[in-house]
Image: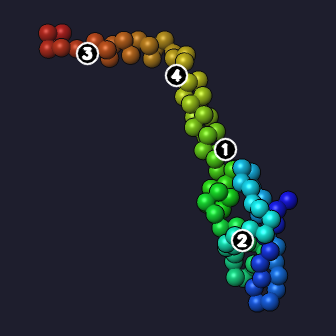
Amino acid sequence: MPKAIFSTNKINDTVNAGYPLRTLNEGQQVNIIYETSDPSKGAVYSWWGYWIQPGEILASVLIPLVFLFVAKAITSSPTPEAVIEEIEMSNPPTRENY
């Protein structure tokens, strides 16, 4: 597992540098972002793995799919009253019908 080593106030700390779909070469320098109060919560500062994480991508795909299936389930079998109402709305009344 790739690790990134950095030092703050003469204390060395290590963070996980391995993310799916990203490769780092041994000895490659990377930027680390961390909380000054707790440097152990650091992370490699890059768009993939810090700004965008695999869980966010998964949620961005799954949430709309769930809504799609819920909407399809709701609209696939309307009640007879709803069908009648929809048919009546497609032929709006005119002045002659009053």
Q: CA distance from mark 4 to mark 3?
A: 22 Å
Q: Position of residue 13 (x, y in %)?
A: 81, 78
Task: Name the image quarter holding the N terminus.
Answer: bottom right
Q: CA distance from mark 1 to mark 3?
A: 45 Å
Amino acid type at circle 3 is Pro
Q: CA distance from mark 3 to mark 2?
A: 70 Å
Q: Position of residue 11 (x, y in %)?
A: 82, 86
Most extreme residue toward the top is 97
Q: CA distance from mark 1 to mark 2?
A: 29 Å
**Does residue 49 sit above or below 39 in this rendering?**
above
Residue 46 horizontal side relative to residue 27, left or right: left
Q: Position of residue 26 (x, y in %)?
A: 80, 65
Q: Which residue is at 14% across, 14% downward?
A: 95
**Residue with the mark numbered 1:** 58
The answer to which of marks 2 and 4 sits earlier in the sequence is 2
- Mark carried by residue 29: 2
Q: Nearer the viewer, residue 12 or 89?
A: 12
Q: Nearer the viewer, residue 4 or 75?
A: 4
Amino acid type at circle 4 is Thr
- Mark carried by residue 75: 4
Mark 1 neighbour density, 10 Å: few (under 14) some (14–19) many (20 or more): few
Amino acid type at circle 2 is Gln
**Residue with the mark numbered 3:** 92
Q: Mark 3: which secondary structure? A: loop
- Mark carried by residue 35: none
**Does residue 87 sit above or below 31 in this rendering?**
above
Mark 3 neighbour density, 10 Å: few (under 14) some (14–19) many (20 or more): few
